[in-house]
């Protein structure tokens, strides 16, 4: 069972910058791997699985050092969202041509966090 909480936050400037950095990194990772999945699909190669993307995420962090400043669980949850988005609408196989990219100016911004050891 999942619980959902809605919070209204009033962050200061430093917290606001960290939140924007997190959302930007999550959007970048989601769109990057969405693009890779589309390329694999169009070239008739096997589509990347979630575990392939997570293993490749460390390489991506080495290329873009600013990704290291963001919570790693947030980046992994964006990959789970990418995986689940395709399965939700198209069954076991993901139709990557119809899943939409994340946009910066979207009116809804979500962040999914996991609770590990009451942290």
Image (spheres, rainbow, N blue to C red):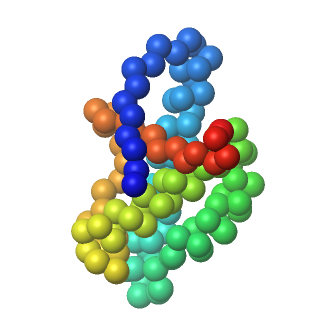
Residue found at x 30% / y 62%: 99
Question: Which quadrant, please, contains the N terminus?
Answer: bottom left
Q: With respect to residue 53, does 4 lie above or below?
A: above
Would residue 113 be found to the left or right of residue 54 on screen?
Answer: left
Q: Is residue 43 visible?
A: yes
**Quarter the C terminus occupies:** top right
Q: Where 87 falls versus 59 (above or below)?
A: below
Provide residue 83's location: percent of width, then percent of height.
43, 66
Quadrant of the rendered image containing residue 109: top left
Q: Nearer the viewer, residue 107 or 10?
A: 10
Q: Classify residue 37 by image quadrant.
A: bottom left
Residue at the image point whose x is 51% and y is 76% from the top: 49
62 relative position to 76: left or right: right
Residue at image location 40% in from the left, 71% down from the top: 38
> In the shown orientation, is residue 38 left or right of residue 76?
left
Q: Nearer the viewer, residue 43 or 74?
A: 74
Look at 74% across and 54% down and name the residue there: 62
Whole-percent x, y for residue 74 in the image = 56, 47
Along the line of sight, the residue nearer the viewer: 44 or 4: 4
Callout count: 0
Can you give x and y, in whole percent of width and height, for residue 58 in the image? 71, 60
Whole-percent x, y for residue 48 in the image: 51, 76
Residue 74 seen in render:
no
In this rendering, the answer to whether 76 lies above or below 97 is above
């Amino acid at each position: 069972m999942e619980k959902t909480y809605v919070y209204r936050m009033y962050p200061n400037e430093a917290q606001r910058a960290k939140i924007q950095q997190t959302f930007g990194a999550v959007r970048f990772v989601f769109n990057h791997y969405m693009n890779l999945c589309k390329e694999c699909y169009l070239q008739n190669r096997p589509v990347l699985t979630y575990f392939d993307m997570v293993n490749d995420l460390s390489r991506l962090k080495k290329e873009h050092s600013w990704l290291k400043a963001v919570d790693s669980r947030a980046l992994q949850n964006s990959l789970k969202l990418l995986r689940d988005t395709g399965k939700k609408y198209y069954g076991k196989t993901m139709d990557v041509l119809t899943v939409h990219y994340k946009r910066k100016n979207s009116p809804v911004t979500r962040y999914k966090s996991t609770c590990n050891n009451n942290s």
